Structure formats: structure tokens, C-alpha cells
Amino acid sequence: MRSAYLEVNSGEGDFRKHVEHLTAAVTLTNNDSGKVYMCSSADGAFSITLPTASTGLDGVHYKFIVWEETPTADITIAAGSAIVSLVHKDAGGDAAASTAGTQVSNIILDTTAQRGDVVDIMFWGGEYVATALSGINAGIHTS
């Protein structure tokens, strides 16, 4: 079902992105696709759980942006049974956090991350593909 905020003629919204501030654990669904999440961990570490390999729908996508300058605790984007292929560049031009053919289950927004660091992730063919940019070396890593 299409959300009303996407319908220009509904009187409910316009062309702005749907943005939510995350400060605690959350489990996302396919219906959350297209949202932008501003992430802060001032209240402690937490996980963002994505749809699994069996429940994800091709084309579902999310964007996560670090909002808190050098987060208080790690924020984990957890793919569960799905795997993630990630291309990542940091401030030093280092691609070491990229998966380079060895997929992972988690993307971690580290306590060294900077406001504006970003992860864009999409489900396709039973797994996730993601890109990440960080303004500092090792601000985003995987496990």
C-alpha cells in the first residue's frame, strides 16, 4: 500500500523526503522503504534491524545518516539472515571497510563517525547492497 505522504494530490505531503530521528533500537519493515534515518546514540548503543533474506522485497531501500557528532555509542545496522555487500570510502580514500567479495551481516556506525557520514542500502536478490561515505578514517566498519 502506498503511503499518503507520497501522494502529492492527497493533500498529505509533497516531494520532501520522509525523515525520522532514531535514538533507540528499531526493526524496519519493507513499508519503511525510502525513508531517511538520522541516527544518534546519546542514550546508548542500539541496533537497527533490517528485513531478513526471506522477508525483504527487491528494491526496498533505506538511508542512514549520522546526526550526532562522534556518536556516544556504536549504532549497528543488522541485516540478520541477509548478507551485505558494501562499497565504502572514508576521508583518507581508504576502501578497507568495503566487503570486496566477502559479505557481512552488520554495518556499524562507530563512535568516531562524523555528522553527515552516510550509509545507503538496498535489498536485491535475497541480499543487501550498500554504499557508505565517511568524513573520518574508520568511522563506518563491518562485522
Image: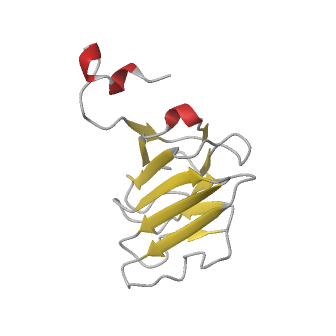
Q: In this rendering, does residue 74 appear at all?
A: no
Residue 92 locus on image (x, y percent):
38, 85
Q: Is residue 66 above or below residue 99?
A: above
- Is the residue 100 above or below the residue 108 in the image? below
Q: What percent of the width, then of the height, locates residue 132? A: 45, 66
State the residue in front, 62 or 107: 62
Residue 31 in sight from this viewpoint: yes
Residue at position x 56%, y 40% from top?
Answer: 24
Q: Residue at x 43, y 44 (%)?
A: 37
Where in the figure is residue 26, as x and y percent of width and height?
A: 60, 38
Q: Position of residue 4 (x, y in %)?
A: 37, 19
Name the side, left or right, on which 143 lies relative to 116: right
Instruction: Tell me: residue 9, above or below residue 89.
Output: above
Residue furthest to the top in view is: 11
Q: Is residue 36 left or right of residue 128?
A: left
Residue found at x 55% / y 68%? 86
Asked whether 92 or 104 is in front, the reply is: 104
For the point 60% across and 57% down, which residue is it?
128
Residue 73 drawn above or below residue 19: below
Name the quarter where the C terminus is drawn.
Answer: bottom right
Q: How many marks?
A: 0
In this figure, which colouring scheme has been used for the structure? secondary structure
Left or right: residue 78 versus residue 2 is: right
Q: Quadrant of residue 35?
A: top left
